Image: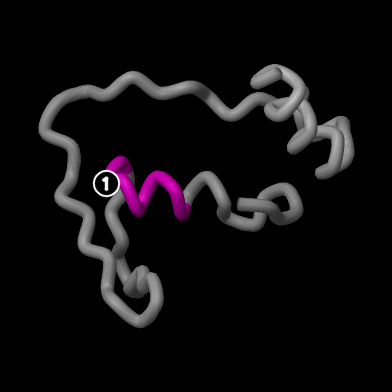
């Protein structure tokens, strides 16, 4: 997912996996409503890093490709 800072990317992902409750809207994918099951046990997460934000989208996407070989 690509978008400007503070546009809700991280919040949307948290809602999709059930870390955060969807209160006033619905999440849809290809017209089907996504209903997260919620998290029953603590799940490991990686905090959003601000280091990647200093680079261009092309450089950030390319990093994964370079690391994959």
| x, y percent for residue 12 | 46, 54
Corner quadrant of residue 29 = bottom left
Taking depth in this image into account, of 19 and 2 the one nearest to the observer is: 2
- Work out whether residue 51 or residue 63 is closer to the camera in this orientation and state it: 63
Query: Which residue is at 15% across, 50% downward?
Result: 37
Give the magenta part as a residue range. 12-19
Which residue, as the protein is rendered here, is positioned at the far front? 69
Q: Find disc 1 in the rendering and name its residue.
A: 18
In the orientation shown, which residue stands out farthest toward the left?
40
Left or right: residue 10 compared with residue 55: left
Q: Main secondary structure of the magenta part?
A: helix
In the rendered structure, does residue 37 fall within the stretch colored magenta? no
**Rendered location of residue 61, percent (x, y):** 74, 37
Left or right: residue 16 compared with residue 37: right
How is the structure coloured here? one colour
Mark 1 Cα within 10 Å, few/some/many (few <14, many 20+)?
A: some
Question: Residue at horizontal 35%, vertical 52%?
Answer: 15
62 relative to 44 in the view: left or right: right
Of 67 and 39, the residue lying toward us? 67
Callout 1: SS: loop
Residue 48 in percent (x, y) is at 58, 29
**Looking at the picture, does residue 2 appear above or below residue 54?**
below
Residue 34 picture quarter? bottom left
**Is 69 located above or below residue 37 in the figure?**
above
Image height of 61 relative to 7, above or below: above
Residue shown at 65%/57% (left/top)? 7
Tally of numbered tags? 1
Q: Residue at x 71, y 29 (%)?
A: 65
Quarter occupied by residue 58: top right
């Amino acid at each position: 997912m690509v978008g400007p800072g503070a546009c809700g990317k991280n919040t949307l992902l948290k809602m999709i996996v059930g870390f955060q409750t969807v209160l006033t809207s619905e999440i849809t994918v290809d017209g089907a409503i996504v209903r997260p099951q919620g998290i029953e046990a603590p799940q490991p997460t990686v905090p959003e890093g601000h280091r990647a934000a200093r680079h261009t989208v092309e450089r950030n996407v390319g990093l994964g490709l370079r690391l994959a070989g």
